[in-house]
Image (tube, rainbow, N blue to C red):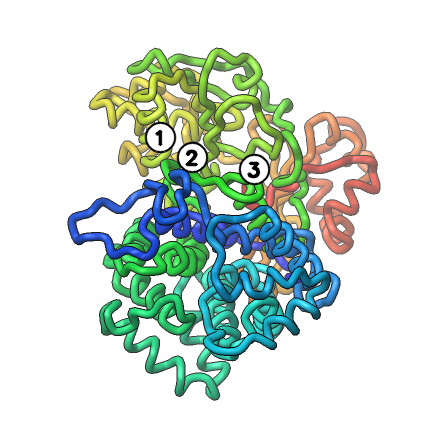
């Protein structure tokens, strides 16, 4: 199970991308399985193939990964018998539904109808002949996600989950190597985990090292039998290292290469997709694909993101209840602001409160919206209104705007919104204006309340939204901030935000090594609760809360800010990365 620790915004994006990348590769390859696409053939989510999948439908690869993820998302330790029994039961549930595509080795195990993981592993170990298929490697990605803080535990769990259907030692080793590479990619944003695993296990380097080198320098014809776990891993690694892009479009390029390599296209692309998603994040998976993704057990892309995030967090939601909460509560930011896009009357621009007003066919949400079915099509974009929190910022803004363009081409009326409609919404609306060959600055005229974050706006327009041709904005004053605590590389400050709320911000420059170089958190207290805090600190009505916090910072931080506030009957909002 995952060790405690906070993930940065980029790490959480990458964690969310693991299952999403797996499914994207799986569904992309499904229409080409057991074939070799011609060099000039288009590779897309076409569906079909030998098993007649629908466009965007994932196959056994993702379905079996979901059976693992439904257990890991509870925080269960996949090495324990109860968790393994639950995974085995999930495999059985999926198999009992009569899936169209099942690997021969997996079928031989699951047809035995084992009732426990131990029985299933015994059945797998008893198989004879060629038992080194790729059927356990294709589903191993989520194991890496479940042990971000525990490399040894990751290897142990990968072996146990593999042995439920594939006891062959090469299959087990491949799962351990790939799971480690995925956890490493989520934590560091690199593909270096493949070699890092071999450096930790030199006894395996003599076998796997030359095979990785062959994949990096050779061609798919050098490892053509990719139904075998060794050649499957090589095919995935070949595609990842051969794709030329150096930005997040690398994910799409590498998955296409997997498909063009041919034969077991859905599985090799699913294997590659798990690592690619771990490296580039959910935000790198284009919305055109995400809108189409679906499969057993009645899930869509949104469910895969939730399973990935919960697994990475050890089964825990964040302080706002996300991703499990049915609906995010944004009522405190309701403002009633809605505008029509200045260049397209079929696009509404606003905040989250505009959803309830209706008047649209499709909602494009630039913020988290919860797990409940909204009753209409909802496109959720992974975009954070904070500086340095969006590694794929230019791609995400462009992809969101192109999604609006696609929806309009489908004849649908679109609501484009974030929480307040102040920053993310006008920025994407400006990019949409550019796609229409229109002036993006007119978006600010249509939305007089907008104050787009400089980093976001600059990624689209190229300069701050002030000056000639733009709404004459008064510069937002920098809030007065006081440092209330400093010790052992932990720095905590406080300031009053523009909306009058108190914000306590912490930065730890030396968290546990596995969770990166630093992390930050932001705790906000409503304006109406500030008098309670003043009184608790011995102040009088009208006293400066920042002065009191500076004087009593150690009292607050040493026991945990949230715990202290709750002891006062205040339920603070924790916005760690969102």
User: At 46% from the left edge and 31% from the top edge, which residue is drawn?
Assistant: 379
Q: Which mark is residue 432?
A: none
Q: Position of residue 315 (x, y in %)?
A: 67, 52
Q: Position of residue 294 (x, y in %)?
A: 48, 40
Residue sitting nearer the eye, 339 or 220: 220
How crowded is the residue under tag 1: few (<14 C-alpha within 10 Å), some, or many (20+)?
many
How crowded is the residue under tag 3: few (<14 C-alpha within 10 Å), some, or many (20+)?
few
Residue sitting nearer the eye, 116 or 178: 116
In the displayed structure, 128 sits above or below 396; it is below
User: At 31% from the left edge and 60% from the top edge, which residue is drawn?
Assistant: 263
Instruction: Indicate the secondary structure of the residue bearing disc 3.
Output: loop
Instruction: Indicate the secondary structure of the residue bearing disc 1.
Output: helix
Q: Which residue is mark 2?
A: 291
Answer whether labels 2 and 1 touch (C-beta < 8 Å): yes
Q: Position of residue 491 (x, y in %)?
A: 61, 55
**Location of residue 212 by image quarter:** bottom left
User: At 35% from the left edge and 64% from the top edge, which residue is drawn?
Assistant: 236
Q: Name the image quarter holding the C terminus.
A: top right
In the displayed structure, 230 sits above or below 530; it is below
379 relative position to 95: left or right: left
Q: Which mark is residue 403?
A: 1
Residue sitting nearer the eye, 32 or 327: 32
Answer whether labels 1 and 3 touch (C-beta < 8 Å): no
Q: Which residue is mark 3?
A: 480
- Nearest to the eye among marks 2 and 1: give it: 2
Q: Position of residue 392 (x, y in %)?
A: 37, 46
Choose the circle earlier in sequence order: 2 or 1: 2
Label 2 vs label 1: CA separation? 10 Å
User: At 65% from the left edge and 67% from the top edge, which residue is drawn?
Assistant: 120
Residue that extends furthest to the left in the rendered view of this protein:
40
Choose the circle earlier in sequence order: 2 or 3: 2
């Amino acid at each position: 199970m995952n060790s405690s620790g906070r993930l940065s915004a980029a790490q959480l994006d990458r964690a969310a991308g693991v299952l999403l990348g797996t499914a994207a590769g799986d569904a992309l390859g499904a229409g080409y399985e057991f074939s070799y696409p011609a060099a000039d053939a288009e590779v897309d989510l076409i569906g079909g193939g030998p098993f007649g999948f629908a466009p965007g439908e994932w196959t056994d690869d993702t379905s079996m990964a979901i059976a693992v993820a439904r257990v890991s998302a509870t925080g269960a330790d996949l090495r324990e018998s109860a968790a393994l029994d639950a995974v085995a039961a999930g495999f059985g549930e999926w198999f009992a539904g009569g899936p169209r595509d099942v690997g021969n080795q997996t079928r031989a195990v699951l047809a035995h109808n084992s009732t426990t993981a131990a029985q299933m592993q015994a059945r797998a170990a008893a198989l004879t002949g060629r038992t080194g298929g790729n059927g356990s490697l294709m589903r191993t990605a989520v194991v890496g996600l479940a042990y971000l803080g525990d490399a040894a535990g990751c290897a142990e769990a990968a072996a146990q989950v593999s042995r439920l259907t594939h006891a062959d030692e090469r299959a087990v080793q491949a799962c351990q190597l790939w799971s480690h590479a995925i956890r490493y990619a989520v934590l560091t944003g690199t593909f270096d985990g493949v070699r890092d695993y071999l450096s930790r296990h030199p006894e395996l380097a003599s076998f796997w090292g030359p095979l990785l080198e062959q994949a990096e320098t050779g061609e798919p014809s050098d490892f053509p039998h990719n139904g075998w776990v060794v050649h499957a891993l090589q095919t995935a690694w070949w595609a990842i290292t051969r794709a030329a892009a150096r930005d997040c479009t690398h994910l799409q390029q590498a998955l296409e290469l997997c498909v063009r390599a041919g034969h077991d296209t859905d599985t090799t692309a699913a294997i590659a997709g798990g690592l690619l998603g771990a490296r580039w994040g959910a935000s790198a998976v284009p919305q055109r694909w995400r809108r189409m993704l679906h499969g057993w057990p009645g899930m869509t892309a949104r469910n895969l993101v939730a399973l990935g995030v919960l697994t990475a967090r050890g089964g825990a939601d964040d302080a706002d209840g996300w991703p499990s909460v049915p609906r995010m509560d944004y009522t405190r930011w309701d403002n009633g602001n809605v505008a029509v896009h200045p260049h397209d009357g079929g696009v509404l621009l606003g905040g989250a409160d505009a959803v309830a007003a209706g008047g649209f066919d499709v909602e494009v949400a630039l913020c988290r919206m919860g797990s409940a079915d909204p009753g209409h099509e909802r496109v959720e974009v992974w975009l954070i209104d904070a500086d340095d929190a969006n590694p794929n910022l230019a791609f995400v803004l462009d992809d969101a705007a192109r999604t609006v363009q696609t929806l309009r081409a489908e004849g649908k009326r679109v609501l484009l919104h974030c929480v307040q409609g102040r920053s993310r919404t006008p920025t994407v609306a400006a990019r949409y204006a550019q796609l229409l060959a229109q002036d993006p600055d007119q978006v600010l005229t249509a939305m007089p309340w907008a104050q787009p974050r400089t980093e976001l706006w600059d990624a689209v327009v190229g300069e701050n939204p002030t000056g000639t041709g733009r709404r004459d904005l008064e510069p937002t004053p920098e809030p007065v901030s006081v440092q209330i605590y400093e010790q052992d590389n932990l720095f905590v400050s406080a300031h009053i935000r523009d909306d009058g709320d108190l914000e306590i911000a912490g930065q730890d420059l030396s968290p546990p090594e596995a969770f990166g170089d630093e992390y930050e958190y932001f705790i906000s207290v409503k304006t109406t609760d500030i008098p309670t805090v003043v009184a608790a600190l011995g102040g009088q009505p009208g006293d400066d809360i920042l002065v009191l916090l500076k004087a009593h910072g150690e009292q607050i931080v040493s026991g945990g800010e949230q715990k202290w506030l709750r002891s006062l009957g205040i339920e603070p909002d924790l916005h760690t990365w969102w």
